[in-house]
Image (tube, rainbow, N blue to C red):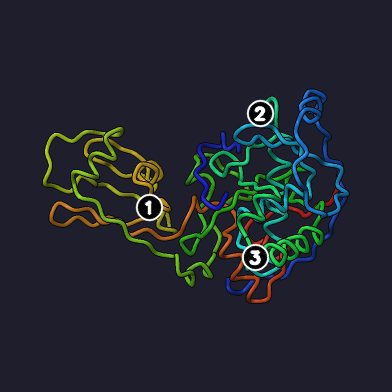
Amino acid sequence: MKKVAITGLIIALGLLIIPLFNIKIEKKTVKTLASAKEKVADETDNSEKSDIPDDTGTVFLIKTSDKIESVPAAEYVAGVVAAEMPASFNIEALKAQCVAAYTFALYRKNEGRYKEYDLTDSYKTDQSYINDALRREKWGEAYEQNSAKISEAVKSVLGEYLSFDDKPALTLYHALSAGVTNSCADVFGSQVQYLVSVDSAGDLLSPDYKSVFSFSEDDLVNKLSALYKPQNGGQNLFSDIKTAKSGLVLSLVYGEKTTSGGEIAKLLDLPSAAFDIEYSAASYTFTCVGRGHGVGMSQYGAQSQAAGGADYKEILFHYYPGTRLMKK
């Protein structure tokens, strides 16, 4: 997830005042790898691993660009958090990210959408993951400090995951909401009981909250040519724009083609589908708020809540209401 463009619930997959929760951590058995996947694990390389102890008994098969790696749960979670969230974030936000990342991986593993592996290492299809060698390269001189902090977060919540209906939840997350998260139904067309719109007012404080992009008419028409090719220029090609309360563009008409804000954002490479459009002098200006699909936990929102005193449990239950915290 830091930039997540996910489609359909094929999703398969990838406030400031917060109520306190009474959490009971329960134990639950997680399925082991299928025998076919165990064979693949035997053939994977042994890349450098961190020294985080792993007592979950769970191993994930991760598809990278050129191979399939067998990665213990704790090492995998550390690699996801390192790739998906700044190590400078509050430790409680990092813990929330650890649980969300682990839960998402369990969801994918149980779902079995891939035959030879559990997840990819890409946010475009699942969630980003970088191994220890890549973390060293990414952080440079800050490696020891950042690695120690993320290791602390992983160790403190190792084995904890969110459950709904006795199964790992689909814990989608994104970089930054528009101040209110989006429901799964609005973005992906399928309703998920715990992926509903919730307040995330802390996102309004982010320096990346708003971004502006301008396109000449010719450039815009060219980028959107896969959708529709207008016959006449010199006019505002957008109409009948419908939005959710977050500002997410649910649908709009481009020329004579009805489409979604998500499709426009994808073709124009916008950071989110929550945008306003202004047309002037044959130029189109898109003012976007938020970053990512806006469903589930906002990472910046988690940081804001943690800075305000919330712990990782409060953060998780705010963004995934109705789930339970379990531990293997």
Other-residue count near label 2 (Cα within 10 Å), few / some / many at <14 / 14–19 / ≥20 = few
**Residue 158: where, in percent of width, then height?**
81, 55
| First in sequence: mark 3 vs mark 2 | 2
Mark on residue 141? 3
Instruction: Please determine whether, in this image, residue 147 is positioned above or below residue 227.
Output: below
The three-letter amino acid code for the residue at tag 3 is Glu
| Pair 3/2: label in front | 3
Reading the image, the residue beneath label 2 is: 114
Percent across and percent down for residue 23 are 80, 62
| Position of 116 relative to 189 (above/below) | above
Looking at the image, residue 222 sits to the left or right of residue 182; the answer is left
Image location (x, y in percent) of residue 284? 23, 53
Q: Which mark is residue 204?
A: none
Amino acid found under the numbered disc labelled 1: Thr
Q: Please tell me which residue lies in front, 293 or 44.
A: 44
- Mark 2, secondary structure of its residue: loop
